[in-house]
Amino acid sequence: MPAELWYGAILVGRLADVFRSDGIWYATVDVAIREPVGELERKLIGYVAFCTDWNERQQGADPPDADEFDRYADVIDGGWTVHTGTVPPCVVEDPPVFFPGGEVSWREPA
């Protein structure tokens, strides 16, 4: 199933190997935004990189605190959708979580 992850009108990434397990969606992601065009793109690029790093640090002896996400509150609180060719696109309930190795997960409203 070809799919894309969007934040508002900005294509964040192209999704592959999409599947759902226990109410959570998983995929590999090819991040589409590389160069910030404006402040929002800069923030989204930062969120993807931060989230990936944060999840990698979870494996260490001193895991990071969830409060570190507070600086991205404006992109965490809504605006995310997954487009699969269906209309309307699927709304993402919680912000997508990016992991090392190009993986991402998200939840849709129940």
Image (tube, rainbow, N blue to C red):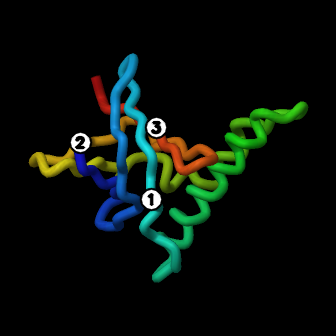
- Disc 2 to disc 1, C-alpha distance: 19 Å
Q: Which residue is mark 1?
A: 30
Image quadrant occupied by the N terminus:
top left
Depth check, front residue: 38 or 24: 24
Q: Residue at x 45, y 46 (%)?
A: 28
Q: Which residue is mark 2?
A: 90
Q: Residue at x 27, y 42 (%)?
A: 91
Spot occupied by residue 79 in the image (x, y as percentages of width and height): 35, 52
Depth check, front residue: 83 or 15: 15
Q: What residue type is disc 2 on?
A: Cys
Dot 2 or dot 1, earlier in sequence: 1
- Disc 3 to disc 2, C-alpha distance: 14 Å
- The answer to whether residue 100 is above or below residue 40 is above
Q: Nearer the viewer, mark 3 or mark 2?
A: 3
- The answer to whether residue 90 is above or below residue 22 is below
Q: Is residue 59 left or right of residue 31?
A: right
Q: Which residue is mark 3?
A: 105
Local packing at callout 2 (Cα closer than 10 Å; few below 14, some 14-19, many 20+) is some
Q: Nearer the viewer, mark 2 or mark 1?
A: 1
Q: Residue at x 53, y 42 (%)?
A: 97
Dot 3 or dot 2, earlier in sequence: 2
Q: What residue type is disc 1 on?
A: Asp
Quick one: SS at disc 3? strand
Spot occupied by residue 30 in the image (x, y as percentages of width and height): 45, 59
Quick one: SS at disc 1? strand
Quick one: SS at disc 2? strand
Image quadrant occupied by the C terminus:
top left
